[in-house]
Image (cartoon, helix red, strand yellow):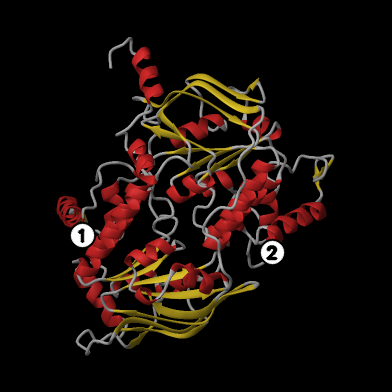
Amino acid sequence: MAKLKKNLTVQSLGIDMDAEQSEYVVEMRNITKEFPGIKANDDITLQLKRGEIHALLGENGAGKSTLMSVLFGLYQPDGGQIYYNGQPVTINSPNDATALGIGMVHQHFKLVECFTVLENIILGAEDQVLDILLKKDARRKVEALSEKYGLYVDLDARIDEITVGMQQRTEILKMLYRENEILIFDEPTAVLTPQEIDELMNIMRNLVKEGKSILFITHKLNEIMAVADRCSVLRKGKYIGTVNVADTTKEALSNMMVGRDVKFAVDKDEAKPKDVVFKVDNLTVEGKSHKKDAVKDVSFEVRAGEIVCIAGIDGNGQTEFVQAITGLEKVKSGTVELLGEDITNKNIRYRNTHGVSHIPEDRHKHGLVLDYSLKENMVLQRYFELEFQNRGFLKFKPIREYSDKLTEKYDVRSGQGADTIVRSMSGGNQQKAIVAREIEREHKLLIAFQPTRGLDVGAIEFIHEQIVADRDSGAGVLLVSLELDEVMNLSDRILVMYEGEIVGELDPKKTTVQELGLYMAGAKRDACFEKQTFEEQGGAL
């Protein structure tokens, strides 16, 4: 039934499925797309060969996601033409794209959180007879796809109960269930752990072996070098060029992307730690399911003038830990201290006004009010200060001036400047707005959870410089990162969290990525932590 509907839609698009195959399965010729105040795509041509992985590279706001949204039917181009197998097509909606075999995994997943995994996969492509949903047939098909591609998920789990890695597998299975042949991955690794990234790279290779064609949007040059056949580069909405990946280097690609050479190593002096600014003592946090503790008896300190990093595989308690110390979740037991004051039960505003800045893991849920303007988001924790209000009335001019200052310093790009609705900005520029707001306001402790998520190499270089400058100015920095390069290059001390416990403290100058990986996987534990656990359990491990 679903295949019949798909064939009818293809016929309505005027496609001759028996036509001789073109070298390019999809061509986007001279595509132009404008929004108020910005030309997101300016005369861009992109050609996808059959059976290749084609990377699309560009800095934040370069127009990559917009171009792919045009191909997927979410936007209509203002100029140019799309060709499918050499034949001109007009893609008016995602349904048209799906009929042509085009699927897309979006940067911010399009899943219904209160639905199960299976319900999300079949949503909009349900097989039914006399209005009766053939759910058993759908389950068998999804299980077969899951087994074939190694995309193992709990089909009965609700989306809000699974990790982001599992959510991404759900999105990929959605495409495969619809029998898509052209797969668009928009920043697919931005929220994944290194292990999950390796898995995804293997999945992409296997999909191409099956004859599928992949468009792969990423900022991560290592991933392009690892899996892509060709790479097209955009900069500020314009097409820069296409290169064979085998014939280029990371340095050449980064230069094409940002127009200058980029330093991949973090340039910083030796840390000079001073007084303790932040301390957790025997902190325990209950898991979301309330069946077990997500964080177990964690204790450590962060001093002024140092960057302490919590490293670990996603899902080992980092999220619950950070939510507890920032006031987003309740603490089950233990204490949280800021500058010697117990703030365990203080509310979020109190923590913000007494020296805590927080770059959250989820920029949409906890970092921004998406339907507010950029200038309003820049003063979310400060609008009540005398600088920005008088007797309860906002001072719009100082708010705009402050927003413009941060926007310029951190190169936050938007179509209408301070008046831009944040929802309309690219994910990378949303992230830069949060980083700017949190680093620039007065604080003693910066809690940075995945601060460079979704940023291009030029922006990462700049943000790392700002975090180091923050450390050198006397703030304590608590970094939580899943990026091993970031952990090794930016940290002064590394604490490894495994299953809610701190299992090791490492010096990045004296350890290796391989040793760090062993701690993260739970295969290794510091002797001091072994001893502590042994004593806590009464001498019986």
Hey, which residue is sitting farthest bottom in the picture? 20
Across and down, in percent, residue 348 comes to: 62, 32
Q: CB atoms at circles 2 and 1 under 8 Å apart?
A: no
Which residue sits at x=35%, y=74%?
A: 246
Residue 287: quadrant of the picture: top left
Which residue sits at x=39%, y=81%?
A: 90
Q: Is residue 497 visible?
A: yes
Residue 96: quadrant of the picture: bottom left
Label 2 to label 1: alpha-carbon separation: 46 Å
Q: Secondary structure at mark 2?
A: helix
Disc number lying in front (2 or 1)? 2
Hey, which residue is sitting farthest front in the picture? 510
- For disc 1, the marked residue is 127
Across and down, in percent, residue 238 comes to: 54, 79
Q: Nearer the viewer, residue 193 or 120?
A: 193
Hey, which residue is sitting farthest right in the picture? 390
Q: Which mark is residue 272?
A: none
The mark nearer the N terminus, 2 or 1, is: 1
Quarter of the C terminus within the rendering = top left
Across and down, in percent, residue 513 comes to: 39, 45
Q: Amino acid at mark 1?
A: Asp
Q: Amino acid at mark 2?
A: Gly
Determine crowd level at label 1: few under 14, some 14-19, many 20+ residues with C-alpha closer than 10 A.
some
Q: Nearer the viewer, residue 89 or 176?
A: 176
Residue 37 vs 167, above or below: the answer is: below
Hey, which residue is sitting farthest top in the picture? 538
Relative to residue 3, is residue 257 drawn left or right?
right
- For disc 2, the marked residue is 417
Determine crowd level at label 2: few under 14, some 14-19, many 20+ residues with C-alpha closer than 10 A.
some
